[in-house]
Image (cartoon, grey):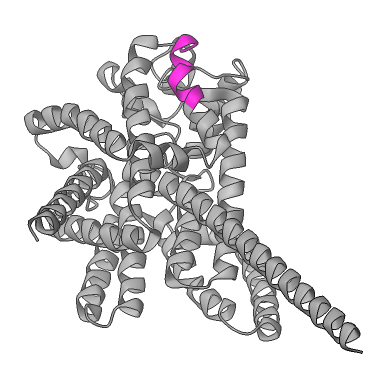
Amino acid sequence: MKNKLLQQWLNFLETLVIGLLLFYFISPSFFSHLTGKYFDAVSYLLVAILIICYWKKFIYVITRDLPLVLLLGMVATSIYWSALPEISSITIKAVLRTILFAACVATRYTIAEQMKLLTWIFGIATVLSLIFHRREIYNNAAFIGIFAYKNYLAIHMVLAAMLFLLAAFGNRRFRYLALTGLLMATALLFLSKGKGCYVIFLISIYLLPVHVFVKQQYKLRIVLLTSLVIVSSIIVFLLLINLQTILVDVLGKNTEFNGRTPIWSLCIEQALKRPWLGYGISGFWGSRESIVILRTTWAKNHVSVDTLQLFNSHNSYIEVLLQLGFIGFFLYAVNLLSTFTRVIYLWMLNPTIETFWMFQTVIILFLFNFTDNGGILSRETIWIIYVSISLSSAVWIQKVKINRQLRKHHSYEYNLQNATLEKLYENKSNANK
């Protein structure tokens, strides 16, 4: 009895530590400077303890995705070719911590448990963002809540809204609580004025009927999905021919995505100067090569000498290209494609809320990474969620393969046994004759 009670307390303590780490990685700026400094240092120790506690299973989980392991290796060694090794050495440790922590989450919890934990963490972040309703000085005094920027609040509220919505579908006991969370997250999303995330939110809602279609019988599923593809193609075509009107009149942006495209083109030009390995983690911004971008774009009005490292290209894919070159970009692209393929396969094989959430979340993060940084090779919870889904789906696929092999083996043994018995009966019958 005492051992069982002790185990329950240890499990609770472990969940509390993991939840606290997830919340810290959601919004380090919420912690005071002094508390954040010490907790940041302690977080490395906490992640190390989690790895040691489950080291055998941890090694199994993290080695299920080879491109991710190779990407992890590139991150760890990029200091050797970094343009700013003193800055890279700090950032590399933080990025490795988030990847390893994500692997711990995938090791310790199933997808259903991850969803439940994230729902509570995002729920706390949503409530605190309403209580501490901070605003940006610029960007029309947009809400940022407990986050550093309006776009970070916006994307986290999109993820939170989808978790609350799926929780309302899947758990009657907390349905009204989940719907309340959905309303709060949606309200914060629109108060953030992160208009790019408005589009991602609408796409996430648009994906909901697809889950209903996937759950149907095979023939009906094909008809419904084909109809959806046709309707979606028409919608995309109409959006493309009216893109300028939508960007300018509806979203309030210009055709350069508020000055992003000039920065993207200049970043790609600079990336081609170090095409294979890039400038190293955090090696580009603050280097000599970044000066042309910081002086000729809108960055000159927002970046000072002390904040060079805080600027980014506002595109996670370009950031990967700048930091790790075409080799790192290729490894991430392979990982993304394999993760997306695994998630779709699992969703089609077992159309549950959990598999749909993986599919929906990968789509959300894939779209967000086009217009902002923080979704790839970062210290953010967004990156943790992606890596956890990638590894969890790989482990799930492995289990499916093992179960299929076992069923085939048992079927073979059963057929062999029946064939042997039939032959035995046949021999007996012949002997009696």
Of residues 73 and 312, the one drawn nearer to the viewer in this rendering: 73
Of residues 31 and 253, the one drawn nearer to the viewer in this rendering: 31
Of residues 404 and 242, the one drawn nearer to the viewer in this rendering: 404
How many circles with numbers are drawn on the protein? 0
Residue 210 % position (x, y): 55, 75
Asked whether the viewer can see residue 315, the reply is no
Does the magenta-highlighted stretch encompass residue 74?
A: yes
Asked whether the viewer can see residue 325, the reply is yes
Q: Residue at x 37, y 29 (%)?
A: 96
Query: Is 312 displayed left or right of 223 in the figure?
Result: left
Does the magenta-highlighted stretch encompass residue 286?
A: no
Q: Which residue ends up furthest to the bottom in the rendered image?
A: 433
Vertical position of residue 354 compared to residue 292: above or below = below
Segment tinted magenta in the rendering: 73-82
Query: Is 109 displayed left or right of 247 in the figure?
Result: left
Residue 375 % position (x, y): 42, 42
Of residues 323 and 356, the one drawn nearer to the viewer in this rendering: 356
Q: Residue at x 87, y 88 (%)?
A: 432
Residue 177 % position (x, y): 19, 75
The secondary structure making up most of the magenta span is: helix
Residue 51 % position (x, y): 31, 35
Vertical position of residue 339 compared to residue 373: above or below = below
Classify the position of the C terminus by image quarter. bottom right
Q: Which residue ends up furthest to the front in the rendered image?
A: 432
Query: Is 10 displayed left or right of 140 in the figure?
Result: left
Vertical position of residue 378 compared to residue 227: above or below = above
Vertical position of residue 69 compared to residue 212: above or below = above
Classify the position of the N terminus by image quarter. bottom left
Corner quadrant of residue 166:
bottom left
